[in-house]
Image: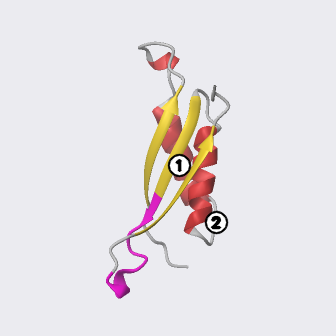
Amino acid sequence: DRTQPFVADLEIEVDSGGDTIEETADYRDIVATVRAVIEDESHTLIETIARRVAQAVADLGRVRMCRVVIHKPAAADRHGVGDISAEASASGSAAP
């Protein structure tokens, strides 16, 4: 197995009740969730990783929606392509 780097760009919509940490999504949990999907789970397709990250983040508290683009920068280097990516989105339980 050859490890390849991934980069995750997230756009999240949160249900924020005010201006305190307790009233919004915990970004430490979001980062830990993204890392767990990418590092701990095994998937063949980058599209599957994108779907899993989007759903896992959407399932966190106060998250209404998560849109993610997973980049696999080294995937097509030998073909002169700088980046390969897949996008997915999911709605969370905090969705209106």
Q: Give the range drawn in magenta.
A: 70-80
Give the labeled residue for mark 2.
Answer: 42
Furthest residue to the bottom? 78
| Residue at point 63%, 60% (across, down) | 41
Q: Does residue 53 appear left or right of residue 9 in this picture?
A: right
| Residue 62 falls in image quadrant | top right
Q: In which quarter of the image is the N terminus?
A: bottom right
Name the residue that disc number 1 marks. Answer: 34
Residue for point 53% across, 49% down: 34
In the displayed structure, would residue 94 be above or below residue 56? above
- Precedes in sequence: disc 1 or disc 2: 1
The correct choice, above or below, for 33 with respect to 83 in the image is above
Q: In this view, does 29 lie to the left or right of 74?
A: right
Amino acid at dot 1: Val
Residue 66: within the magenta? no
Check disc 1 and report its element: helix, strand or loop. helix
Q: Would you call the spot at circle 1 few (<14 residues within 10 Å), some (14-19), or many (20 or more)?
A: many
- Is 24 rendered above or below residue 57? above
Name which residue type carries label 2.
Answer: Ser
Residue at 50% x, 78% y: name it.
2
How far across and how far down the image is residue 73, in percent? Answer: 38, 69
The crowd level at tag 2 (other Cα within 10 Å; few <14, some 14-19, many 20+) is few
Is 72 one of the magenta-colored residues? Answer: yes
Q: How is the image coloured?
A: secondary structure
Q: Which residue is drawn at 51% across and 39% down?
A: 30
Label 2 secondary element: loop
